[in-house]
Image: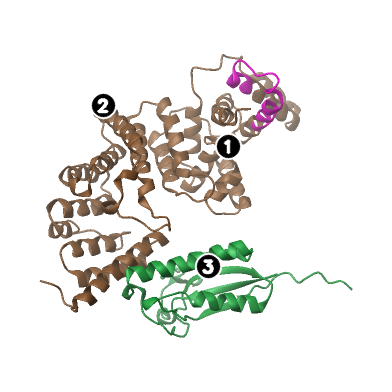
């Protein structure tokens, strides 16, 4: 088993195929989308592949040490290119192929018109302790 | 073995030891040892006075531990100061434990954790689960809190207001994990209300009961929020509402108004209405006036604006927002709601979408997104993006 991070972006990723802002959907479409996400996580819990999932606020702040006595917080000059993460799910699966398969499923969550969003998700393996070496 | 009895006695016994001069952490360890003894011995030989038994055994355990660890000199001093055994009973030392756990030297998060541990008798694992943090993290937080209050002597009455703030924090922490923190906060506040006649304790208890009574109607099966006006009032717990109102009336009768009583009065007026339309908004505005006078809190003024909007119309509600900081949590959602009530759906939809982005929890963000979606769908249907007349 290996752990993978499925990352959902607010922006920074290529546009989704069904790229309509959520507030332009119908309330029923919003509900259907959220149910799909919940059921996806619940199903992975059943298969023993779910580790963690969290949603993040759309706003954040860049912070950097700026020398002693200076305020460390800055919100520019790169605010426009902030690659903000909308949320993540950590899965623990048998293979890379399974991770890709699940990310594909998650990307097919229904959006406007009940059609899949086809949004881009990032799949990244965790760097974990190497397996025991037997020589 | 009656676990609930043991859990309810634990804080009182810790309180006795602390008052006799034991360090908080040492007292807690000693009581844990005594509980182990109780579990072992009570089934065959139940004591007449469970609390007295626990105090006696815990005190002995404490002395044993202190003697074993401390130097000979320290031991002699301790034996010297050992108080004459006194009858355990009438005075409830748990109250002092409440004050200790809410000590001003603790951060709010530490005070909450320590209160749940010492007064609530919850295990570290249970508290960690309720806060969705690893058990080791919570163990550290609690042990640091214990260190902070170690050596604090309670020789003057603590501040009830601080204790109430901690209990209200517990109540508002939500319902994750296997411990229902709202129910736990109510249990602890009930205990506190028995120990002290402070009218704000009654006010907080009433407020919690009135909020908690409406909880079954507040969310749908999928976890989404149901606004007050749309809640199925048949699912409100009428018994709990009646108790809350009774507790509140007794407190109000003593004519020492505080912010929790005022908030409870507002909650009682909501609970009293059989339909949303029957809500007595005029009286609710009056209570918000009291609350603003008592606290000066911007949040109270924001909520007051909503009530004004219901009592005197949306325009009056918007006017009541004057001078408030738009960065206030939920400010945008309130403005959106008042614009919708005023018939300006285009502005309302735009503001709901913005409020959704600003929301600090998923249920609220989802609710506000649906509000925006609902209005946008309406506007598409009417074929107009312009403000209806």
Q: Main secondary structure of the magenta part?
A: helix
Q: Is residue B18 magenta?
A: no
> The chain shown in green is which?
A
Residue A40: numbered disc:
3
| Mark 2 or mark 1, earlier in chain | 1
Chain identifier of the residue bearing label 2 in the image:
B
> Do the residues under discs 2 and 1 have CB atoms within 8 angstroms?
no
Which mark lies nearer to you, 2 or 3? 3
Q: Which mark is residue A128?
A: none
Q: For residue B348, what is the image quadrant?
A: bottom left
Q: Does any portion of residue B287 appear in the rendered image?
A: yes
Horizontal and vertical percent position of residue B323: 20, 59
Magenta span of residues: B32-55
Query: Which corner quadrant holds the N terminus of chain A?
Result: bottom right
Discs 2/1, front: 2
Q: CA distance from mark 2 to mark 3?
A: 55 Å
The chain displayed brown equals B
Relative side of B3 to B308, left or right: right
Residue marked by disc 1: B150
- Identify the secondary structure beneath mark 1: loop
Q: Residue at x 53, y 30 (%)?
A: B153
């Amino acid at each position: 088993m290996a752990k993978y991070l499925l990352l959902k972006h607010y922006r920074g990723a290529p546009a989704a195929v069904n790229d309509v802002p959520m507030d332009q959907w119908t309330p029923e479409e919003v509900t259907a989308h959220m149910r799909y996400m919940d059921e996806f996580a619940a199903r992975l819990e059943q298969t023993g592949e779910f580790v963690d999932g969290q949603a993040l606020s759309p706003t954040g702040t860049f912070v950097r040490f700026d020398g002693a006595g200076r305020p460390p917080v800055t919100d520019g000059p790169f605010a426009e290119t902030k690659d903000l993460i909308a949320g993540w799910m950590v899965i623990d699966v048998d293979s890379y192929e399974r991770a890709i398969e699940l990310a594909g499923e998650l990307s097919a969550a229904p959006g406007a018109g009940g059609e899949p969003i086809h949004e881009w998700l990032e799949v990244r393996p965790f760097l974990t302790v190497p397996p025991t070496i037997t020589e | 073995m009656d676990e609930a009895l043991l859990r309810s006695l634990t804080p009182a016994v810790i309180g006795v030891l602390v008052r006799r001069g034991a360090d908080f952490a040492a007292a807690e360890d000693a009581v844990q040892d005594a509980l182990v003894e109780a579990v072992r011995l009570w089934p065959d030989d139940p004591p007449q006075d469970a609390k007295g038994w626990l105090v006696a055994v815990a005190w002995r355990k404490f002395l044993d531990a202190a003697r074993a660890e401390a130097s000979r000199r320290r031991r002699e001093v301790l034996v010297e100061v050992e108080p004459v055994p006194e009858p355990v009973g009438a005075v409830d030392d748990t109250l002092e434990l409440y004050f200790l756990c809410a000590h001003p030297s603790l951060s709010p998060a530490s005070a909450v954790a320590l209160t749940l541990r010492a007064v609530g008798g919850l295990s570290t694992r249970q508290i960690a689960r309720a806060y969705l943090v690893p058990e080791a993290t919570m163990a550290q937080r609690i042990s640091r809190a214990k260190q902070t209050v170690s050596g604090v002597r309670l020789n003057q009455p603590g501040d009830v207001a601080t204790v109430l703030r901690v209990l209200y924090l517990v109540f508002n922490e939500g319902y994750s994990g296997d411990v229902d923190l709202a129910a736990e906060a109510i249990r602890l506040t009930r205990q506190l209300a028995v120990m002290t006649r402070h009218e704000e304790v009654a006010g907080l208890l009433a407020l919690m009961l009135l909020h908690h009574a409406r909880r079954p109607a507040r969310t749908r099966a999928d976890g989404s929020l149901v606004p007050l006006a749309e809640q199925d009032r048949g699912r409100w717990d009428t018994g709990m509402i009646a108790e809350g109102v009774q507790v509140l009336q007794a407190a109000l009768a003593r004519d020492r108004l505080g912010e929790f009583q005022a908030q409870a009065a507002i909650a009682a007026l909501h609970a009293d209405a059989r339909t949303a339309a029957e809500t007595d908004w005029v009286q609710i505005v009056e209570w918000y006036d009291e609350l603003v006078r008592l606290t000066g809190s911007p949040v109270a003024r924001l909520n007051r604006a909503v009530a004004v909007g219901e009592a005197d119309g949306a325009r009056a509600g918007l006017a009541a927002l004057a001078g408030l900081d738009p960065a206030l949590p939920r400010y945008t959602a309130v403005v959106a709601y008042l614009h919708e009530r005023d018939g300006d759906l285009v502005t309302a939809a735009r503001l709901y979408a913005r409020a959704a982005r600003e929301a600090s929890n998923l249920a609220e963000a989802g609710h506000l997104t649906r509000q925006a979606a609902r209005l946008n769908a309406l506007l598409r249907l009417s074929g107009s993006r312009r403000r209806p007349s």
